[in-house]
Structure formats: C-alpha cells, structure tokens
Amino acid sequence: MKNLGQLLEPTFYILSVIFLIAGLVVGYPGGFLYFILVKLLYAVLVSIVIHGWKAKESVLVESEENKWIVNINGIPIIDNTHALKNLHFNSEKEMSRKYFILLLPKLILSVLLLTVTVITLYQQPLAITFDSVIGVLMSLYLTYKTLECYRLFSGLSDGKWHINSYSLGDRIYYSAFVKNRGQYTTFLNKVFS
C-alpha cells in the first residue's frame, strides 16, 4: 500500500496544480499564490536560511544524496543532488526558536491568502456556479493548509514533538521528529510540506 501512495503522489500533485490554475482563471488567486509563495519561494528561502545557519556552525545539517540516471538519446546523464533531511541543534531551546523562525512566515502567508480567498468568495453573488464551487474548494484547501501549519506552530510551544539527542565528539545534538500515521517524520519535512 505504501508503494501505491508513492506512485499516486505525482498524479495528485499535477491535479492540484491544475485545480490551482483553474482557481486562478475564475478569480481565486489565493491557492495559486500559496503554491508560488509557500511551495516554491518559501522553500528556497528556508534553504538559504538553513545554509546560513550551517555556515555559522550553529546547526548540523543532515542531507541525503540522490543519484539520477537519465538517458537522453541513448546517452546516460548522471546527476547527483543533495536533499535536506534533518537539522540537529546544540540545545532544545535553540531548536524550538529556529523552527519558530522558519514556521512564522509560512503561517502568516497562509492566513493572509486564506483571508483573501474568503473575502473574494464573500463578495461573489450567492449562487451555485462553477466559480463559487471552485472558491469554496479553494477556501477549504487553504483552511486545511493553514490549520496544518498552525498545528505545527502550536506544537513548538506545547512540546508535541519527539526529541532525539545524540553525541558527536564532545557535543550533544538535538533533532525533532513528529509522529505521522504511526511513523516518525522529521520536523523539517513537515515544515516543507
């Protein structure tokens, strides 16, 4: 069953992009802006911030190497990429503070885009049309994403995460995990989702 989810993930991603473009066309730009600002621009900015922390040596960054082999006209092209996997901090307090810094802009953007979509929906005439159905679905999608971000954000102060500590040399590092459907996922992965 896990393999089925991995196979269908690109399909759901493409369908969600089509849905967001449809929302943009009928006058609900909130979902499309969420995709551009949060899924693309925010992810790049978070990576830049993490790289700055890594340069200051205040964070230990765990990454994984992905090797891609693609055949173009029979010529194999090999590409190695590194993906962020987890962050390890010097203290639990620092970990909480830095995840707060990472999540606050995402929460603010989500709330603003949800507000814009709801205001746009409110200004439409009360009739069941294709446009209003897209507007309601867009509002539900943005509400879900905002609540998901808020749960992560509130989990920082409530301690609703699992902390793993280990020593490397003479230092102790802390990393955060959340339980998701019976499995542990890195907190950084949830920040990007």
Image: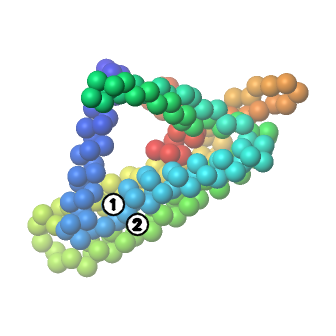
Give neighbour class at mark 2: few <14, some 14-19, many 20+ (Cα, 10 Å).
many
Label 2 close to label 1 by CB (< 8 Å): yes
Extreme residue in the right direction: 170
**Is residue 126 among the parts visible in the rendering?**
yes
Q: Position of residue 62 (x, y in %)?
A: 64, 32
At horizontal 17% and vertical 78% (from top left) the residue drawn is: 125
Q: Quadrant of the N terminus?
A: top left
Q: Position of residue 5 (x, y in %)?
A: 32, 28
Circle 2 is placed at which residue position?
Answer: 113
Where on the picture, by quarter, is residue 137? bottom left
At horizontal 80% and vertical 25% (from top left) the residue drawn is: 167
Q: Amino acid at mark 1?
A: Gly
- Nearer to me, 95 or 52: 52
Q: Is residue 22 left or right of residue 29?
A: left
Label 2 – label 1 distance at C-alpha: 7 Å
- Could you tell me which secondary element the residue under label 1 belongs to? helix
Q: Position of residue 141 (x, y in %)?
A: 33, 54
- Could you tell me which secondary element the residue under label 2 belongs to? helix
Give neighbour class at mark 1: few <14, some 14-19, many 20+ (Cα, 10 Å).
many
Q: Amino acid at mark 2?
A: Leu
At horizontal 38% and vertical 52% (from top left) the residue drawn is: 144
At horizontal 47% and vertical 26% (from top left) the residue drawn is: 67
Sequence-first disc among 2 and 1: 1
Q: Position of residue 102 (x, y in %)?
A: 61, 53
Looking at the image, residue 183 lies above or below residue 106: above
Circle 1 is placed at which residue position?
Answer: 31
- Nearer to me, 123 or 87: 87
